[in-house]
Amino acid sequence: MAIKQSGKQTKLMSMELREFIFDNPDSTIVYYLPEDHYVGIARNKNFWRRLHQHRSAGNYTYDVDIIAFYERRVDAHLLETKLHVRGYTGFRDLTNKKKKV
């Protein structure tokens, strides 16, 4: 299911997707930004905020594709990791962050 944006307003392609996001705020979305070859995950309730963060960072968010929804975040993370291994961008290595002194 794709999300299309025109101007400053985001329009969902289907009412079912809108209702699903509203009815399942704690589910996790796996999404794809084709222009940046980026795959990421976000909770349904934080999805629009996450897209805004991408736009603020200069990423192109007008053709966002929803890959999947998951009830368990770990399942979404596994799919995201598989796609990152295949070459999609978006992985943040949080295990090797240097501690501030």
Image (tube, rainbow, N blue to C red):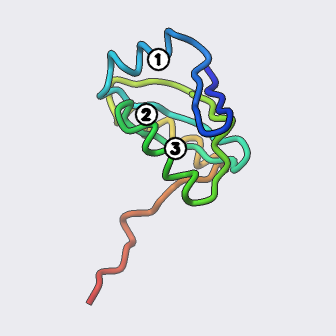
Report the side of 41 relative to 67 (left or right): left
Check the image and name the residue furthest to the bottom: 101
Determine the secondary structure under disc 3.
Answer: helix
**Amino acid at pointer 2:** Ala
Query: Mark 3 or 2 closer to N-term?
Result: 3
The Cα atoms of the two marked residues, 1 and 2, are separated by: 19 Å
Residue 20, how many percent across, how many down? 41, 15
Task: Please give the residue where the numbered disc 3 appears in the rendered image.
Answer: 51
**Amino acid at pointer 3:** Leu
Determine the secondary structure under disc 1.
Answer: helix
Report the side of 26 relative to 46 (left or right): left
Compared with 91, 12 (above or below) is: above
Where the C terminus falls, by quadrant?
Answer: bottom left
Task: Please give the residue where the numbered disc 2 appears in the rendered image.
Answer: 76
CA neighbours of label 2 inside 10 A, class few (<14), some (14 to 19), many (20+): many
Where the N terminus falls, by quadrant?
Answer: top right
Query: Mark 1 or 3 closer to N-term?
Result: 1
Task: Please give the residue where the numbered disc 1 appears in the rendered image.
Answer: 18
